[in-house]
Amino acid sequence: MFSYDKKYSSHSAVFGENPEKILVDHFKKIENSKPVLDIGAGQGRHALFLAENGYAVEALEPSEVGIKQMEQVSSEKSLPLFLTHADIKTFEAKADAYSAVLLFGILQVLPREEIEDLLQSIKKWTSLGSMIFVIAFSTEEPSYAKHKQDDKEVGKHSYLDAKGFLRTYLEPNEILQLFADYEVVHHDEHLTEAHHHGDGNIHRHAVIEAVFRVQ
Ligand SMILES: C[S@@+](CC[C@H](N)C(=O)[O-])C[C@H]1O[C@@H](n2cnc3c(N)ncnc32)[C@H](O)[C@@H]1O
């Protein structure tokens, strides 16, 4: 069973009920003429939020459980949400261009080479004024040292544990290099309050949050 299927089956809001604050703060800047692409949409806290606010959203998610959970809410409310049950590696964009691409918690689960490919694809999937929203983890994260010590290094700051769980960290401010061609609308890096996901352990994240615009 895909690891996120298990997580999503046991809890209805593993990453919380609410969308990330950077989306709430900046979503009104997204042009509504083209759809939004949410990559690794999970249980839909961002895709559903935007769809409820009148944006057409394509939610790409490999977890069948996540897709079904989003489908249920979307059909009850007749939202403009289009569900794509796929992996980013094989995804083919349906729209000519998306008005925004959401990368909430996806960079940290991809190996470095897939992050590189994704950044190239995003250039093809966007046009002038399109926005990119990012939440990722930095090497300042308390769990980084543990992964570095215990797990197999498979790329720069990227570790694979014995159960096949992959975690990739970006260096502080590295996100600005990865998106060097874009206008920076918002960028902040900080340590979160202690919290837990679903029934998981209490922990803190060194979060990178960023909003970029194609210029
Ligand atoms: C940390 S969760 C974040 C979920 C959601 N974006 C949120 O913020 O609530 C990462 C999500 O990425 C999805 N995912 C993992 N590998 C993926 C891949 N190769 N392509 C697309 N999505 C992937 C997982 O199934 C999971 O739902």
Image: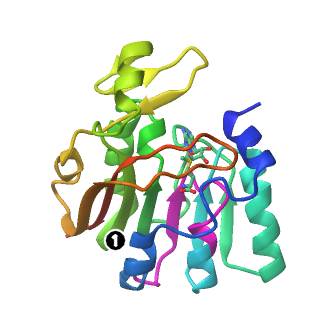
Examine the image and state in which quarter residue 151 appears. top left
113 vs 104: above or below: above
Quarter of the image with the C terminus is bottom left
Q: Tag count in the figure?
A: 1
Q: Which residues are magenta?
A: 30-48
Tag 1: residue type?
Ser
Q: Position of residue 98 (x, y in %)?
A: 44, 68
- Answer above or below: position of 132 versus 6: below
Q: Is residue 34 located in the magenta-colored stretch of the structure?
A: yes
Tell me: 140 left or right of 117: left
Provide residue 181's location: percent of width, then percent of height: 16, 57
Q: Which residue is mark 1?
A: 130
Q: Is residue 196 visible?
A: yes
User: At x 50% / y 70%, what residue is drawn?
Assistant: 36
Q: Is residue 110 above or below residue 39?
A: above
Residue 101 in the image: state x and y as whole percent. 43, 62
**Which residue sits at x=61%, y=18%?**
163
Asked if residue 3 is positioned above or below residue 129 in the image, the reply reads above
Query: What is the magenta segment's predominant secondary structure?
Result: loop
For residue 178, side relative to residue 138 (left or right) = left
Quarter of the view holding residue 18: bottom right
Q: Nearer the viewer, residue 42 or 81?
A: 42
Residue 213 percent coordinates (x, y): 26, 69
Q: Is residue 98 visible?
A: no
**Position of 183 compared to 81: left or right?**
left
Q: For the residue carrying disc 1, how many other residues have a C-alpha within 10 Å: few (<14), some (14-19), or many (20+)?
A: many
For residue 10: magenta? no
For numbered disc 1, what is the local secondary structure?
A: strand
